Amino acid sequence: MEVIPGRPDLNTRTMLKMLAEARGRQAQIAIFPEMCIPGYLIGDTWEQQAFLRDCERHGRMITEASAGLCVLFGNVGIDWSKTGDDGRVRKYNAFFIAQNGKLRGDENFPYPFRIKTLQPNYREFDDTRHFYSLRKLAPELGKSVEDMLQPVRLNIAGESVNIGCILCEDGWSEDYSVKTIASVHRNGPVHLFVNISASPFTLGKNNKRNRVFAKQVESTGVPLIYVNNVGTQNNGKTVYTFDGFSTIYNGKGEIIDYCPPFTQTLKCIDLDLTQKGEDHSPVTVPDDQGMDSVYQALNYGIDKFTRSIGMEKVVIGASGGIDSAVSAALYTQVLGPENILLVNMPSIYNSATTKDLAAKLARNLSCQYTVMPIQESVDYTIKQISHTPVVDLKNGRQFNLTVTPFAAENIQARDRSARVLAGLAAAFGGGFVCNANKSEMTVGYSTLYGDLAGFLAALADLWKHQVYALAGYLNEHVYEREVIPQKTIDIVPSAELSFEQAVEQGKGDPIFYPYHDYLFHAFMEAWNRSAPEDILDWYRQGILEEKIGCQPGLAKQLFPSVREFIADLERWWKLYTGMAVAKRIQAPPVLAISRRAYGFDHREAQNGLLNTARYYELKEQLLNTLKKD
């Protein structure tokens, strides 16, 4: 089901409708996702007692609707007589089972619901901020966690059925001391494991989930049903899509059915538990690692997010470059060309090539299109700054400020966004988007209040090489024709903010994406994030490209000397940990698809540059070796 965060009323309405359909299809058990009544990512709304009472109220409505049906669902479980570690009323991330108007499971557990054992405290997850886990409750009651992991014993159609209740992270126990599924199994017998989840989409995550869950099922010999929600949820700075991909594993760990990703579906299956589902033939699940999954997640995320905030029209700055072209193609597919206004905002530095490409893109997409030159307003701003006297009120001295070439570049970017795009969006009745990609956001290669502005950064979790790959996918598989001009894909990427970035002369961005994309990935997206010390050590050992994943020999090709390599490394690390942090903090929400997206998924503080002592030792060794040579 699609879960709307913070809306128990809408979610309960969806559940009741699906229950009616399930009952009409003679279902005996209906399973809904984790936190399907309140939603999962709702910030500190959990601190509102009125909201908690509302969740309980809607939970009772589902319980009352369980006549002749066993309903498994997620909601917040509340113990009003106790407090959590924060001194507020105690809350649990809970798994409820309702049957014939009553909650089940309290005969061998302190509550008429099961509670989450393993609470994730990484990436976007912040469960321990709000919820009390079984790992805390067990010692409080003088019991072991393992002994409290009991199945829920039910009678369905005259047969005893013991359900092992698993809540999302409980199924990802490899790195935890408590092995939830194994413990429930030992306290069995268990006839069926059910994992209800609120698991955001991450590229390749479903592939890994199937490997992990299949292995767990093989170890127990008990079939497992995994139920996840669809929709989008956010924590303010990062927007997450939920792909659903609910899956059924038989007793051998084979997948025998699944729900299509990013689709609300009521899937009904006849599951003979005496056969452990092994009477069903295994099916093949689509891979979720390719560009088709990237597109599907972005398309779905843009659609759901714009709907949730009531954004029906958008304005996009079309430069003739790759990022704005991909952005335009994505939004056009979601909102329709009549609701997209593309605007080209040339200065004296913009080439005829890119201006023509912007117009061609608009024609190919059949969008609304306009051209608004900015040179006159940029010149006026520069003149106003440089010719308006500044007075030192201490001594009456007057002086004039100088606009450097670098400052003039930023004035162009801010004029485009803060003046033209913002003004056009208001007149057009919509918002304007941010076209920044992940490579640019990593090192702050963007202008604060300029091209980093917008209501959503839909491309900001894609490295530049992924943006190019997505452009090809959009042309070939989505539009099935060349909507993004091939020349946009072929020309050198450039901001065109000075004559030093003239694309017709082959001049462009200072970032060499085939190498720097992978260096930046090592900085922020690798699970064990790398620092210059690691990069320099790998360089010294001759294994850098292997470690970061770029083309072999590329570092030596780009940087003939050790000194050049170190200078490049220090340049980008200084930006990544310095000014880029300030820019990212003020950036628009990022639509996440990777295992670490900017925003709340990548928590950072403005602490400035740090290199380790070991880094300076390695640097000195390498430079001394250079001197000897």
Image (cartoon, helix red, strand yellow):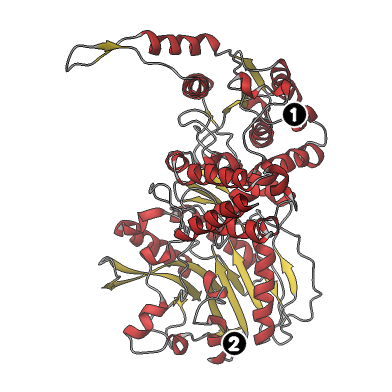
For numbered disc 2, what is the local secondary structure?
Answer: loop
Q: What residue type is labelled 2?
A: Val
Q: Is residue 81 left or right of residue 543?
A: left
Measuring from the top left, give residue 216's x and y in whole percent: 64, 80
Q: How far apart are marks 1 and 2 (CA)?
A: 61 Å
The label shown at residue 367 is none
Residue that carries the numbered disc 2 in the rendered image:
190
Q: Please, which residue is most extreme toward the front here?
A: 628
Which image quarter is the N terminus in?
A: bottom right
For numbered disc 1, what is the local secondary structure?
Answer: loop
Measuring from the top left, give residue 13's x and y in whole percent: 51, 55
Foreground residue among 488 and 16: 488
Q: Is residue 324 visible?
A: yes
Residue that carries the numbered disc 1 in the rendered image:
491
Foreground residue among 472 and 283: 472
Label 1 Cα neighbours within 10 Å, binned few <14 / some 14-19 / many ≥20: some
Q: Can residue 69 be seen in this view?
A: no
Q: Please, which residue is most extreme toward the left here?
A: 394
Q: Is residue 184 left or right of residue 368?
A: left
Measuring from the top left, give residue 69's x and y in whole percent: 57, 73
Measuring from the top left, give residue 447's x and y in whole percent: 50, 30
Note whether 589 is above or below 210 in the view shown.
Answer: above
Question: Of the residues tagged 1 and 2, which is closer to the observer?
Answer: 1
Residue drawn at point x = 49 percent, y = 74 percent:
98
Q: What residue type is labelled 1?
A: Ile
Q: Is residue 288 left or right of residue 309?
A: right
Note whether 252 is above or below 437 in the view shown.
Answer: below
Residue drawn at point x = 38 percent, y = 89 percent:
143
Foreground residue among 186 and 476: 476
